[in-house]
Each structure stands twice: as structure tokens, then as C-alpha cells.
Image (tube, rainbow, N blue to C red):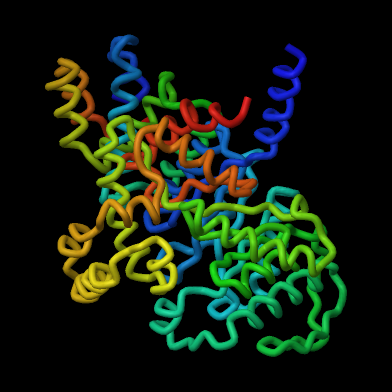
């Protein structure tokens, strides 16, 4: 499943909280080397032109955090947002261009 | 009523000239630093300064990415030095950046940190002359003509770019000592003062005025910039906790004359120096006193920070730079500054 499709599974009212948390995971992550250069450019372009609260932005964030901080991301989806189905879809998603 | 209106108008004129800058250390992957650069632009900062240390990511690659991903923020190295990077290469880098982001580039030039330079095998001799020479070469080469210059530290002979630079780029000089401060007033478009306390700004402004007067300039020709150690959070203890490691390093690197200006106990300062030298960071950070925090950083809630920034504005600064650590969480602190600090001074 693509990241855009995964985002559609997330209720709109939970997207802002998720976006905020994922940004923290990403910016505090020590696993910077796991970030593909193409995704880093995509991340910056998205931030420059829009943000991370919409579907496209959230898909970029999900792809990046699934690579850099997969455990934290799925744990937050399952434990805090009660979105076990989204967490499961994320675990099965194939990175690299999925967004 | 009229008096009140005039007073308000006058206050607005003063406040309108105040600029807010932010400093980032490119110690993490470039995309994180550029994320914060974009955020700073979106949140109303005027200037962005990227530090230049050989042991971090390269300042110019970071600035090139900043040029691509931003539209209006003014940016530059804050600060580079002429010992590690030859002035010709600095000029080339800035002229190239000015093509990428026309009119948005500034140079921050200082003498460099002797300890860091020593670790590269470079002996930073004649620091004042080196900075003066570097800036003379910088300005001359930006004219796009062949440059011959005989300085005390740097000399060039018939040096010329194979491209035409866009024109002059504002020069800010990083200064702390009396001679560098006066020189900055004399030849600089701005001065970057590493200080967070009105006592240090008062002293610096006095020295800058001498240089300005010698050059027949006006103080309004110089952007007097406080390059502070800053930390903001809604919970003051969190802001202070984030700032204390930075303050420990400032205390360790400050000359005793500056410590004495603030009534800092030299014995405690030496204890911090010793602990840092041994790598005992817990010991060093734990020895930072409230007096040290007061002297060398601006940390606390937005209201506390605003009051301290006001004191610096009264002392004569025209740009306030939010420097490391910015806050316990850089992203949320930038948002907090945008919501509760900048609007306090700008309408």
C-alpha cells in the first residue's frame, strides 16, 4: 500500500497531532543516514511549498519516519492514536518512492 | 491624545528597525538545518546565520540549500574566519550564493576561535589585521576587477574572477574586544556582538561609536547585532536547563576581564574550565551559577525573554539574534518566538 493510501486511513481530526509527533521523531532522530537523499529533498520541498498537515505532507512524513524511526511511529499510531490498522499497513508498506 | 499618538508613532519607528535573526549550527544532516531555515523564514525572522566550524557540516553547502528552499530571508556565514578559509574563496562563495539568492546574502567575518584553529595546525596571528585584510580583499574582488592588495597578513596580486559578481555584499564583523569593535564600526555594515547582557552591549556600542565617528559614518549605518545565547520555553526551568551547557562553554571561553565585569567567581569559572577539559560535562554544567546564566544567556518564558530583549534594544542594538540553543525543542521554540516574542517588538 502506498503512503498516500495509508494517510487516507487516518481520521482527519488526528492528522495534526500525528504530523506534530512525526516531525519531532524525524528532527530528533539520530538515524539520519537512513534518510534517502531524494526523500530529504521531497521533505524540504513539501515544507517550503505547503506543510505536513495535508495528505501529501503527511505521506512524506510517514515514509520518512517509517525509515528512520519505525518502532516509535507504529507505537504512537497503536498506543496513542488507537490506529492499529494504520500501524499494520505502515509495517507492510514498501519504502522508496511509496509516497 | 495627540501626545499619546506621537509617542506610539515614535515607538513604532524605533521598533520597525529592529530585526530578528536566528543562528544554527550545522551539526546535523543538512535537511534538518534547512528545515529550521525554512521554518524561520515562515515564522517571520529577517536573518539567518549559519556557523562555520570545520568540525561541523560545511557552511556553504548549508547556505546553498537554504538559498534554494527560501525566498526572502537574508542569510550568511555567522561567522567565518580568514585563517581557515582564504578570503578569496570566501568572496567566491558569497558571490556565487548572491547569484542564487540575489540581494539576500551577507558576510559574517570574525577572527576565529584560537583553540579550534590550533587543532587544525593554524596559528591565528595578527587577528585584527587578518580580518581587515580579508574584508578589503572581499570588497575589492566583488568589484569584478583585477585586485592587487598588500596587507599585513594577506596579499593578492592581479587576482580576478572569470565571472562578474553582482555587486557589494554587506559585511558584518564578529567582535568582542575593543579594537575589533571599533574596526567593525569603521569598516563594517554590521557588528555581531557575542553577548546577551546590556553591560556587554553598552561597552560594545561605545567602542563601535568610536570607529563609526572615525570613519565619518552615522550609527544608523551600522546594524548593531546582539548574537545571544537564547532559550525559550513556557516552563522557565526547561529553558534554563537547555541553556546551561551553552553557558558553561561561554564561561570557559570568556576572558577573565569579561567574567569580572559580571562579578563571576573566577574559582568557579576555573572549575568549569577544568571539568570541560576532562570531559566531565555533568560537573561543568552542574557548576553553572544563576549569575552566569544572567550574564551569558537569555533564557526563560517569552515574557522574561521579551523584557531582556527590551533592555538590549535600549542599549542600542538593531538586530537581535536568537542563538544556540534556541530552546529545549528547536522547532517548538521557533514557533513560540514567532507567536510571543517577535510580535511584542514588531507589528
Residue in the image at 16% along x and 36% along y: A71
* Picture coordinates of residue B119, whole percent (x, y): 39, 82
Residue in the image at 82% along x and 85% along y: B148
Whether residue B236 is visible to the viewer of this picture, yes or no, is yes
B176 vs B105: above or below: below
Q: Give the total number of marks visible in the rendering.
A: 0
In the rendered structure, the answer to whether residue A31 lies left or right of residue B70 reads left
Q: Which quarter of the rendered picture does the N terminus of chain B lie within?
A: top right
B312 vs B16: above or below: below
* Picture coordinates of residue B185, whole percent (x, y): 71, 64
* Picture coordinates of residue B19, whole percent (x, y): 62, 41
Residue B222 picture quarter = bottom right
Residue A26 picture quarter = top left
Q: Which quarter of the rendered picture does the C terminus of chain B lie within?
A: top right
Frontmost residue, A58 versus B341:
B341
Frontmost residue, B257 versus B153:
B257
* Picture coordinates of residue A8, whole percent (x, y): 33, 14
Frontmost residue, A3 versus B187:
B187
B254 vs A51: above or below: below
Residue in the image at 48% along x and 39% along y: A44
Whether residue B62 is visible to the viewer of this picture, yes or no, is no
Amino acid at each position: 500500500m502506498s503512503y498516500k493510501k495509508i494517510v487516507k486511513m487516518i481520521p482527519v481530526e488526528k492528522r495534526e497531532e500525528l504530523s506534530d509527533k512525526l516531525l519531532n521523531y524525524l528532527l530528533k532522530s539520530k538515524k539520519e543516514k537512513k534518510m534517502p537523499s531524494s526523500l530529504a529533498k521531497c521533505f524540504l520541498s513539501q515544507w517550503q511549498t505547503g506543510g505536513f498537515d495535508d495528505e501529501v505532507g503527511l505521506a512524506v512524513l510517514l515514509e520518512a519516519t517509517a525509515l528512520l524511526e519505525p518502532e516509535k511511529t507504529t507505537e504512537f499510531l497503536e498506543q496513542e492514536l488507537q490506529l492499529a490498522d494504520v500501524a499494520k499497513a505502515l509495517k507492510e508498506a514498501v519504502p522508496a518512492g511509496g509516497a | 491624545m495627540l501626545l499619546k499618538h506621537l509617542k506610539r508613532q515614535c515607538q513604532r519607528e524605533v521598533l520597525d528597525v529592529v530585526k530578528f535573526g536566528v543562528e544554527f549550527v550545522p551539526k546535523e544532516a543538512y535537511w534538518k538545518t534547512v528545515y529550521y531555515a525554512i521554518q524561520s523564514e515562515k515564522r517571520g525572522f529577517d536573518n539567518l546565520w549559519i556557523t562555520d566550524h570545520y568540525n561541523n557540516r560545511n557552511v556553504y553547502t548549508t547556505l546553498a540549500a537554504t538559498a534554494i528552499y527560501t525566498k526572502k530571508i537574508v542569510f550568511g556565514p555567522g561567522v567565518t574566519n580568514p585563517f581557515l578559509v582564504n578570503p578569496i574563496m570566501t568572496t567566491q562563495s558569497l558571490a556565487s550564493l548572491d547569484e542564487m539568492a540575489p540581494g539576500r546574502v551577507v558576510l559574517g567575518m570574525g577572527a576565529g576561535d584560537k583553540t579550534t584553529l590550533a587543532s587544525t595546525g593554524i596559528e591565528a596571528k595578527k587577528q585584527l589585521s587578518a580580518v581587515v585584510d580579508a574584508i578589503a580583499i572581499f570588497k575589492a574582488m566583488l568589484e569584478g576587477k583585477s585586485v592587487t592588495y598588500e596587507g599585513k597578513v594577506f596579499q593578492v596580486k592581479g587576482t580576478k574572477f572569470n565571472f562578474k559578481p553582482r555587486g557589494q555584499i554587506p559585511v558584518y564583523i564578529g567582535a568582542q574586544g575593543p579594537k575589533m569593535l571599533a574596526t567593525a564600526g569603521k569598516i563594517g555594515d554590521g557588528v555581531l556582538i557575542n553577548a546577551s547582557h546590556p553591560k556587554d552591549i553598552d561597552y560594545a556600542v561605545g567602542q563601535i561609536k568610536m570607529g563609526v565617528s572615525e570613519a565619518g559614518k552615522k550609527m544608523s549605518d551600522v546594524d548593531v547585532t546582539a548574537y545571544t545565547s537564547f532559550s525559550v520555553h513556557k516552563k522557565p526551568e526547561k529553558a534554563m536547563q537547555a541553556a546551561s551547557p551553552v553557558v558553561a562553554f561561554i564561561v570557559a571561553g570568556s576572558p577573565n576581564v569579561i567574567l569580572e565585569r559580571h562579578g563571576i567567581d573566577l574559582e568557579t569559572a576555573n572549575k568549569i574550565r577544568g571539568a570541560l577539559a576532562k570531559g566531565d560535562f555533568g560537573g561543568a554544567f552542574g557548576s553553572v551559577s544563576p549569575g552566569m546564566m544572567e550574564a551569558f544567556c537569555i533564557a526563560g518564558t517569552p515574557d522574561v525573554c521579551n523584557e531582556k530583549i527590551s533592555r538590549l534594544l535600549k542599549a542600542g542594538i538593531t538586530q537581535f539574534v536568537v542563538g544556540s540553543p534556541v530552546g529545549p525543542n528547536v522547532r517548538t521554540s521557533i514557533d513560540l518566538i514567532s507567536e510571543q516574542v517577535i510580535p511584542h517588538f514588531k507589528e
